[in-house]
Image (tube, helix red, strand yellow):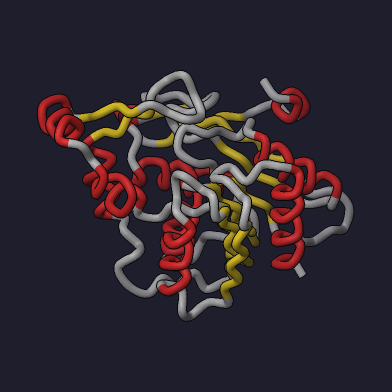
């Protein structure tokens, strides 16, 4: 368990009902002093959790600047309950929305990494429909992967993987970040189409800063440029990091994340 988790005891929120109920772990740092800024909300990527390096660094940044910070583990990730193989974009979006509404901040600034960038965009869309949610002040998207199931995975499926999806309802691939393989289910792929955002204008109603590595083997930088084209109504800044990988977790990358957050707070 990370130092941040030891410093702040995680809490749990039950999301869903009946057989769909799962315990979602989150860590909420309260605002200190008279900072008065938005609550920073961290959204992790696929198979990542709130104890990852960028999430922990963002929490430290919040502490140093007197800001509130909210992190959560999606079901099947980290400290949360539920099966990973039950996970879909809709399910993980539901959990993020539930935790945010439960804590009820007035304003938020979302920092989403990889798949978390997709969920951040969907979260902004869902909050815009509500009267009881917080105002989204801004978004920092790190190697965002909206529509990754349909745009980045499906076009590259092998015959064996396609057959596994049909016969078994999932396929596995070796992970570059874990000894355990990545598992992609048919439900995730189908639900991804229902949550597609790269099919028209995305209205976040807030400024957006995208950080993207040009040596990212998982999400090509052209995907970030495509996302920008779908955000014509928003103030968007795209920072391309020439030698950056997918994680963007080096000290200089963390510094870029902090600078982007500070810029949106101002």
Tell me the quadrant of the picture where the C terminus can be found: bottom right
Q: Residue furthest right?
A: 33
The residue under the point 47% across, 19% down is 179
The mark total stands at: 0
Residue 153: quadrant of the picture: top left
Q: Where is residue 14 in the image (x, y as percent from the top left)?
A: 46, 32
* Vertical placement of residue 131 versus 215, above or below: below
Left or right: where 248 falls relative to 117: right
Is 191 positioned to the left or the right of 69 in the image? left
Say whether residue 54 is visible: yes
Residue positioned 47% across, 70% down in the render: 228
* Quadrant in which residue 21 is drawn: top left
Residue 162: x %, y % from top left: 16, 36
Left or right: 66, with 236 as reference point: right
Q: Position of residue 232 (x, y in %)?
A: 46, 79
Residue at left offset 55%, top offset 48%: 113
Image position of 184 with respect to 253: above or below: above
Q: Where is residue 217 in the image (x, y as percent from the top left)?
A: 47, 45
On the question of residue 139 being in view, the answer is no
On the rendered image, what quadrant is the N terminus found in? top right
Q: Which of 62 and 116 is in front in this view?
A: 116
Determine the residue positioned at 60% across, 71% down: 237
Relative vertical location of residue 113 with respect to residue 182 in this rendering, above or below: below
Viewer-proximal residue among 241 and 61: 241
């Amino acid at each position: 368990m990370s130092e941040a988790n030891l410093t702040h005891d995680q809490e749990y929120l039950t999301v869903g009902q009946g057989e769909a109920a799962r315990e979602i772990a989150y860590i909420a740092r309260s605002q200190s002093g008279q900072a008065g800024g938005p609550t920073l909300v961290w959204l992790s990527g696929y198979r990542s959790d709130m104890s990852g390096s960028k999430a922990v660094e963002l929490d430290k940044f919040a502490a140093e600047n007197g800001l509130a910070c909210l992190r959560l583990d999606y079901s099947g990730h980290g400290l949360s309950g539920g099966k990973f193989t039950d996970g879909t974009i809709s399910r993980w979006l539901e959990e993020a929305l539930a935790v945010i509404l439960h804590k009820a901040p007035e304003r938020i600034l979302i920092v989403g990494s990889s798949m978390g960038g997709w969920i951040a965009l969907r979260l902004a869309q869902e909050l815009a429909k509500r009267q009881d949610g917080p105002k989204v002040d801004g978004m920092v998207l790190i190697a965002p992967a909206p529509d990754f199931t349909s745009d980045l995975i499906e076009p590259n499926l092998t015959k064996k993987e396609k057959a596994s999806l049909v016969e078994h309802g999932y396929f596995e691939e070796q992970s570059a970040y874990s000894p355990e393989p990545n598992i992609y289910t048919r439900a995730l792929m189908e639900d991804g189409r229902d949550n597609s955002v790269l099919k028209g204008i995305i209205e976040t109603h807030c400024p957006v800063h995208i950080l993207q590595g040009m040596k990212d083997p998982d999400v090509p930088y052209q995907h970030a440029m495509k996302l920008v084209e779908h955000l014509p109504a928003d103030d968007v800044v795209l920072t391309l990091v020439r030698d950056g990988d997918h994680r963007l977790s080096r000290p200089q990358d963390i510094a870029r994340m902090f600078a982007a957050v500070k810029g949106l707070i101002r």
